[in-house]
Image (spheres, rainbow, N blue to C red):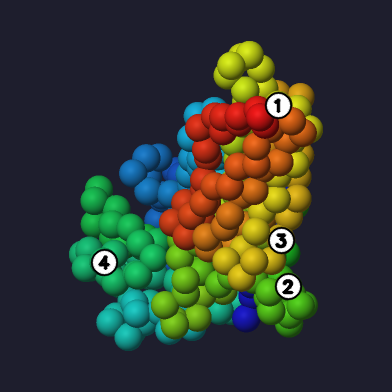
Amino acid sequence: MKALIVDLAKCNGCRCCQLACKDEHCGNDWSPYALSQPMSGQFWCNVEERERGRVPVVRVAYTPVFCGHCDECPLEGAAPDCVRRSADGFVIIDPEAAHGRADLADLCPYGRVFHNVELDVPQKCTGCAHLLENGWSEPRCVDACATGALRFGDEADFAEEIARAQRGSAGFATDPGIGSHVYYLNAPKRWIAGTVADRTINEVIIGADVAIVDEAGNEVARVQTDWAGDFRYYECDQARYLVQIHARGYEPVELVADCTQADVVFDDVLVVRET
């Protein structure tokens, strides 16, 4: 079976993959693989954007999303007369046989099957099977990726990476036991950020020592505030931490950073001079 490897550390949100999918499938009838994809309303390849943190520390995480062509695809059991596998194992909805089967769009747990209202047919990513079966080595989305974030090939060739990847198809959703063949590498971790300042003199504190300590009391990181008094640590697990701040001439500060649900961005951490 083929695999799609998505390295999130390399995705910059350019959407070349999404545009290439539209270019290949909008206005083109690739029967018996698929009819034309609508210009709007559905994206067989989509780049999701998720804002993280809050002002003044904000980042955007980009996640390319695809059909997983799952081993236990529920469409196959529900409509064996409409759904088949390509030579590479991709799940293909026959557009002629599936005409009028809008119900199939509701069966995918990832939401990666769409109903084309105008043509009254369920549609989804075909893995560009029409190209792969005619000499291409990879789908259009992978071919268009400018950063190397997307790679395609036999699962056996990616065994080492798959062993440490997160399996899924929609964002960071866990594979619900149906065998997706999309694998995500380098999913971003939680982060802690803040600014250390002395507002009695209206100055930020440069070079303050910031220790990140886990619940077991182990120091997992040590950083310093920069020229703007800011500190950031981007490698937190989904857990609770203590943030211990020491600045010369100031009383130490200890804060709780709960990263179990979201990133933590502190308001100004105000320090008090030692007496």
Between the C-alphas of marks 1 and 2, the distance is 42 Å
Residue that mark 4 sits on: 106
Residue at 37% x, 40% y is 40
- Of tags 2 and 3, which is closer to the observer? 3
- The amino acid type of the residue labelled 4 equals Asp
- Of tags 4 and 2, which is closer to the observer? 2
Residue that mark 2 sits on: 161
SS category of the residue bearing label 1: loop
- Which percent across, then down, holds residue 45? 50, 52
Residue that mark 3 sits on: 219
SS category of the residue bearing label 4: helix
Q: Name the one closer to the observer, 189 or 15.
A: 189
Residue 3 picture quarter: bottom right
Which residue is at the far front?
Answer: 275
Residue at 43% x, 49% y is 43
- Of tags 4 and 3, which is closer to the observer? 3
- Which percent across, then down, holds residue 50? 48, 44
- Which percent across, then down, holds residue 10? 71, 49
